[in-house]
Image: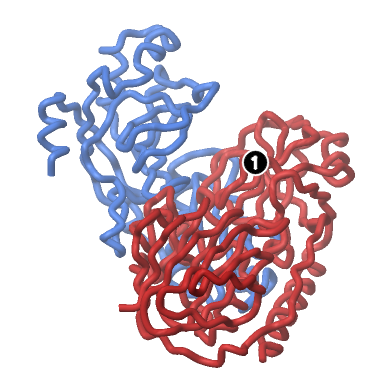
Chain colours: A red, B blue
Amino acid sequence: MNHFRVIRSGINTTFQDLGRKNLYHMGIPFSGAMDNRNYILANAIAGNKEDKPVIEFAFQGPLLKFKGKKINFNITGNVNFNIIKNKNKIEGECYKNYILEDGDELDILSTNKSVYGYLAISGNFDVNYNWDSCSINTKAKIGANNGNKLEKDQLINILNSHSLNSKRKLKYINSKIENIRVIKGTNFNYFSEQGKKIFFDKKFTVTKLSDRMGMRLEGHKIENIEDTNIKSEGIIKGVIQVPADGNPIIMLSDHGTIGGYPKIGVVISADYDKLVQLPPGSKIKFKEIELSEAEMLFKLYKMETQNLVLQIQ
Amino acid sequence: MLKNILNLGDAALYCDFGKEVSKEINYNVIKYFKNIRDKQIEGITNITPSYNKLIISFDLNYTNFKSVKTKIENLELKDFTNIQGKSVNIPICCDDSFALDIKRLEKKLNITKDKIYEKFFSKEYYCYMTGFIAGHPFLGDTDKKLRVKRLETPRVKIPKGSVGITEQFCNIYSFESPGGWNIIGNTPLNIFDKSNELKPNLINPGDTVKFNQITIEEYKEKNKK
């Protein structure tokens, strides 16, 4: 059977798809690819349906050895990678289909000034599903690979591989942004006037304590004048909580379904993909917008994604 | 009819049922949760009931705040008389090796370990919600003499099955997780079972939980299965 052998696993390499719905009331997070646009583009370039599993990696990706009949693959994001054919190294470009043949190696070295990248193949990764999704949640041990990150020496089997137009590609450059637009949160008034001003006027730094569950920020403390705890209640991705220490935490795709810290704001849906790509050390400045504007920006974001899919040739 | 529905970001509704934590308010939350779920409104991706709130998130690709809000406001409520869920028995072993915080609690509460357990095991608990981590139940209310705050510095790892108390609530850690509740024992039962996709959680909102104390030998016997 066609397969990859994992020679090096990378830092946080998982299978992801569109995630799982209607399970928050049981405590099960949404999960799914962090950067949705790059997930969609990876499958589109590979010629797959949009809900197929892909391999998501963070910072350093895996080194994979391919065995079997030739297939296509592509990588999306801002990623440095090499294809090694008979000891010849070919430097790879993102958003472009390549052919992998028996014995080739794919070395995903690093994400460049970003966090997440995606590997899609012209075929199906042979993975197990929980609640109609293969998305791995390592905390709850849910999804493909028994809910674990990929490990060294394991095999990844490939089913129904179809070799197709290896010329398919897209011209696209991920723009990096510093301004993240937010809508005021339901506990906005828990914070002092000074605290509110700091939240929108100052720049925050992304810390190393960031993962698929959340992004911790530091730089300026936001003073709470009401209560540093609320009665625990449901949260969603993009919610910015401020615990007692005054440092904001942004909830990301694997977040706990219930939280007990005041919510100062929520990142708009249109900016989520860009947010998750900010590596530790990046600066963030929050900008307040209204709901109607956020809805308009989402339509624009969606149209842009659809246009990109149409531009694949 | 639900009033004062706010937006939480651009893709969720925030419904507030009142300031207090009480069974009555929580019944109402669960009633709405079940009604909305049964309606299968297009675009809704999650409905999260908690003590006194209901968060309804949706996919902006299919709907928006105004549209979902109108549908929720005009919802015809069916009365669920069976909101009171099932009764669940949970065995707990309180051996010192499991009761990580019992010595601390004796000091903080100024009562003996035996009294703490006597009070804890004499009550039945209501499940307000499940969440935070998969299957994790929030139960209440504990005896007034057992109420303490969370640990000042949460533990990085709390063992699977640990039973904790804080304020008027108790919980069960469905798997190993960070956390700050005061741990008084451990259950050998699986609280979350991902292989049972229709009913992965042993305890669900509205259920009643009764704890019973077991010995370390009984614990080991049950844990083998």
* Position of residue A32 measured from the top left corner of the image (x, y, whole percent): 52, 64
| Residue A34 relative to residue A287: left or right | left
| Residue B68 relative to residue A140: left or right | right
Instruction: Give me the residue at 79% from left, 61% from top.
Output: A176
Q: Farthest residue in the front direction?
A: A87
**Label 1 crowding class (10 Å Cα cut-off): few <14, some 14-19, many 20+?**
few
Q: Chain of mark 1?
A: A
Element on which disc 1 rests = strand
Is A246 or A106 nearer to us in this picture? A106
* Position of residue A154 measured from the top left corner of the image (x, y, whole percent): 35, 60
Using the rendered view, name the quadrant where residue A294 is placed.
bottom right
Report the amino acid beneath label 1. Lys
Is B13 or A126 nearer to us in this picture? A126
Q: Label 1, on which residue? A: A208
* Position of residue B144 measured from the top left corner of the image (x, y, whole percent): 42, 21
| Residue A104 relative to residue B55: left or right | left
Q: Quadrant of the C terminus of chain B?
A: top left
Residue A25 in sight? no
